Amino acid sequence: MSITAQNQAQFNPIRRSAMHHKHLLLGALMVERDGWQQPAHFGSAEAEAKHLREALGICDISPRTKFVIKGDKAEQLVSRVFPTALIPDVGEIIVEAHAGGIHGANAALCRLAQDEIICVATTGLATWLADGLKDDSGQCVHSLDISSALAGVSIAGPQASHLLAMISELNTSDAAFPNLCCAQSKFADIHGTLLRIDLGNLPNYQLYFGREFGEYMWDALVEAAEVCGGAPVGFEAMDQLQG
């Protein structure tokens, strides 16, 4: 075996989110999951689950797979990949369970404009989506994997809308922004895309924004969360709520 092959065998490439360093500073236990270093918890998953149920928690969800489909034929391309899914109207979301025939995998189809749909999915669906969204028909549509371009944070809990009101002019109340809605706006002066995908009866907003603003946005969210009685949480607490 060559030295190069030996070195390759010793190393396994692991991805890190834009907020990785911030998580370490907060004492997170980092664990490899789906090829990413992710915070399992920041001290106690049970305490973090309590924050989620009673106030709010913010969780790094950057590892989720993200594709944008744009063009006049965007709806047709998405329908080819998700033949049983209803295509949402502008501003709405459809969640496809067991996407790709994989139990537990899910994909959210979010229509931002008549000719633009974002698909946010379980990390393990990246290859399946990339293959399915290839289009060689010559029609006016294209897809792009933006997983590495966007960072993401889940803001979940009874006080989630209160936090968002502190950093954005977008009305995210239950009446104005119910479950399975999506919109683009500015959050802490940064352009972002907001999805509402509740966890049962628990309000849950997914905020996606440019990776280059990851640390800045995380700091802004941590500060706002503290005012609302919330705190950063790891994936273990989120998993508890998702059953």
Image (cartoon, rainbow, N blue to C red):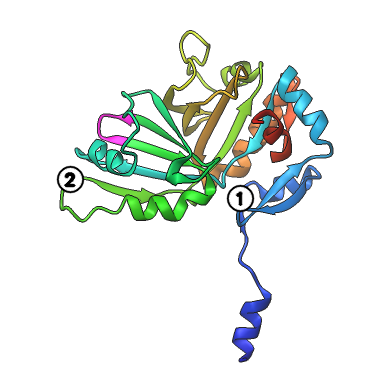
- The span picked out in magenta is 112-116
Q: Is residue 82 above or below residue 123?
A: above
* Residue situated in front as seen by the camera: 79 or 191: 79
What's the residue type where badge 2 is placed? Cys
Circle 1 residue: 17
**Which residue has dot 2 on it?**
140
Q: Residue 61's quadrant in the figure?
A: top right
Q: Is residue 134 left or right of residue 225?
A: left
Is 115 contained in the magenta span? yes
Residue 185, magenta (yes or no): no
At 66% from the left and 17% from the top, the residue drawn is: 159
Whether residue 181 sits left or right of residue 133 in the image: it is: right
Report the side of 43 relative to 99 (left or right): right
Q: Earlier in the sequence, mark 1 or mark 2?
A: 1
Disc 1 crowd, CA 10 A, few/some/many (<14, 14-19, 20+)? many
Q: Secondary structure at mark 1?
A: loop
Q: Amino acid at mark 1?
A: Ser
Q: Which residue, as the protein is rendered here, is positioned at the far left?
A: 138
Q: How many marks on residues?
A: 2
Few, some or many residues within 10 Å of mark 2 (<14, 14–19, 20+): few
What's the residue at 48%, 39% (across, down)? 98
Counting from the top left corner in percent of width and height, residue 96 is at: 43, 34
